[in-house]
Image: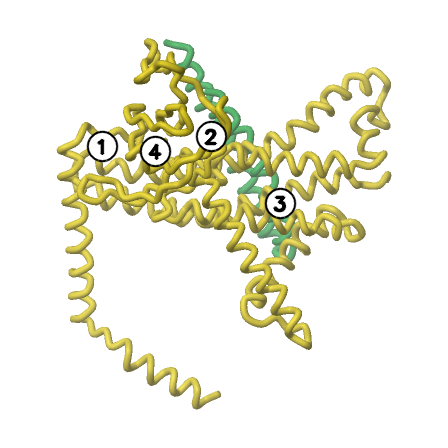
């Protein structure tokens, strides 16, 4: 297996990690909104920021390949 | 009011008399037209070299010296853009049409006593005495070098178009407010007001704070609408991927602006948190200092990569799904690939707004961190 192949596997793992992370954020945000529908706007903002930060890591891993 | 709506209804009833029979006929007509187009496309690709999705996608995502609109009977129809070069013999400019759509370095253009070729959307200047370009084993040119390229490429062109459009929209909005006596927005101002208030109330105020947000509003509004409109332009198929916000030089410039504003608006408190973190033991202060200094630069870099990667990834996914048809060379895959790429396109329309929002809100967050008072 070449270096590129190993790097591709690493990028795949990073993508899985980012996917799990964003999934958890989305799920928690859903629960939070279900508990407190009046805080919808604030929860959504926080969710988008956190998701964007994780997404940045995922993309950085992809571009490292 | 009632009469008005009555008349409207009458007009509607008269103009839209689509009976089921007509609907079926129209649908069949549209389908026939689209299949005709598809059949033509297939014939052309079979005559030419095998379809290379990677080359096609890169051609769409990268910057170019001409505005390629579509192919007509095998020859490309495009808008030529000016090429401006700074060479050892001074400034020179000529039209990109003089390359005759050649991107392999075959056509040599003489201008201002120097000769140029275009190779993979890069302009190379041939060395003195060379009559054609030659390559080494890795297909890099050996007897040519790149002059300083100040050309108006399609990204620059689209940026000017978007700037002109933004100026038109916002100057009209401002004029609308000036004209109306009671401050009630009219015309396009009615459309822009909620968006501007959204940026103020959802981004500026909560992230920076009630007292200081006003100073940063012009910048936040500018980047929000500039990124948004360029994201939307990138999705319009006829503009053929004028992928401005998916260009790392563009996002780099915006991130540098955010970095400069953050650094210059940083107060005593901000710098203290970077160089001598309060409230932790001294060894920890020393340990945290380099991390915080790296963090200063990582923030704008992550802004840059996030916007660039999101927009580019969206374009690549749409184009990859479309090229499935030509890779498998069958119409059977077409409904699947068209349906999926339509689905991704709709998601991308949402992403255009979300990415503009994320860039703006994170910039605002950094400004807020820089101006935060001691607590």
Q: Which chain is yellow?
A: B
Which one is in front in this view, the residue at disc 1 or the one at disc 4?
4
Q: Earlier in the sequence, mark 4 or mark 2?
A: 4
Crowdedness near tag 2: few (<14), some (14–19) or many (≥20) residues, C-alpha within 10 Å: many
Q: For residue B116, which quarter of the picture?
A: top left
Q: Chain of mark 2?
A: B
Left or right position of B97 against B307: left
Q: Earlier in the sequence, mark 1 or mark 3?
A: 1
Residue B360 badge: 3
Q: Chain of mark 3?
A: B
Q: Which chain is green?
A: A
Q: Earlier in the sequence, mark 4 or mark 3?
A: 4
Real-space Cα separation, disc 4 to disc 3, in angstroms: 29 Å
Residue B57 badge: 4
Residue B327 badge: 1
Real-space Cα separation, disc 2 to disc 1, in angstroms: 38 Å
Left or right position of B133 against B28: right
Q: Which residue is mark 2?
A: B85
Which one is in front in this view, the residue at disc 2 or the one at disc 1?
2
């Amino acid at each position: 297996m070449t270096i590129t192949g190993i790097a591709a596997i690493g990028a795949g793992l990073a993508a899985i990690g980012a996917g799990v992370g964003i999934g958890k954020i989305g799920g928690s945000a859903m629960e939070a909104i279900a508990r407190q529908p009046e805080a919808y706007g604030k929860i959504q903002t926080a969710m988008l920021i956190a998701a964007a930060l994780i997404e940045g890591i995922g993309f950085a891993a992809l571009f490292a390949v | 009011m009632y009469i008005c709506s009555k008349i409207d209804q009458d007009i509607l009833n008269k103009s839209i008399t689509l009976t089921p029979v007509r609907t079926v006929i129209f649908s069949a007509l549209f389908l026939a037209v689209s299949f005709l187009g598809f059949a033509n496309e297939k014939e052309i690709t079979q005559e030419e070299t095998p379809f290379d999705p990677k080359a096609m996608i890169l051609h769409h995502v990268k910057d170019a010296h001409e505005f390629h609109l579509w192919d007509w009977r095998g020859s490309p129809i495009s808008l030529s853009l000016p090429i401006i070069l700074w060479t050892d013999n001074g400034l020179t400019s000529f039209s990109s049409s003089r390359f005759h759509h050649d991107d392999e370095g075959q056509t040599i253009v003489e201008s201002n006593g120097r000769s140029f070729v275009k190779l993979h959307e890069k302009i190379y200047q041939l060395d003195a005495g060379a009559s054609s370009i030659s390559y080494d084993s890795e297909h890099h040119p050996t007897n040519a070098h790149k002059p300083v390229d100040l050309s108006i490429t399609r990204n620059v062109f689209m940026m000017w178009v978007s700037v002109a459009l933004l100026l038109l929209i916002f100057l009209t909005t401002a004029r609308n407010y000036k004209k109306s006596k009671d401050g009630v927005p009219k015309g396009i101002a009615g459309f822009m007001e909620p968006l501007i208030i959204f940026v103020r109330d959802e981004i500026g105020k909560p992230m920076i704070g009630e007292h200081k947000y006003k100073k940063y509003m012009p910048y936040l509004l500018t980047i929000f609408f500039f990124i948004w409109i360029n994201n939307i332009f990138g999705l319009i198929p006829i503009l053929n991927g004028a992928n401005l916000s998916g260009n790392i030089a563009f996002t780099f410039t915006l991130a540098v602006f955010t970095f400069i504003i953050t650094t210059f608006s940083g107060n005593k408190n901000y710098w203290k948190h970077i160089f001598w973190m309060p409230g932790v033991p001294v060894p920890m202060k020393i340990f945290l200092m380099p991390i915080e200094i790296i963090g200063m630069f990582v923030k704008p870099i992550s802004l840059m990569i996030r916007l660039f990667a999101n927009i580019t990834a969206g374009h690549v996914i749409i184009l990859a799904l479309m090229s499935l048809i030509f890779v498998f060379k069958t119409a059977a895959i077409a409904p699947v690939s068209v349906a999926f790429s339509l689905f991704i396109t709709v998601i991308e329309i949402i992403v255009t707004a979300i990415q503009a929002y994320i860039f703006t809100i994170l910039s605002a967050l950094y400004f807020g961190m820089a101006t935060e008072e001691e607590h």
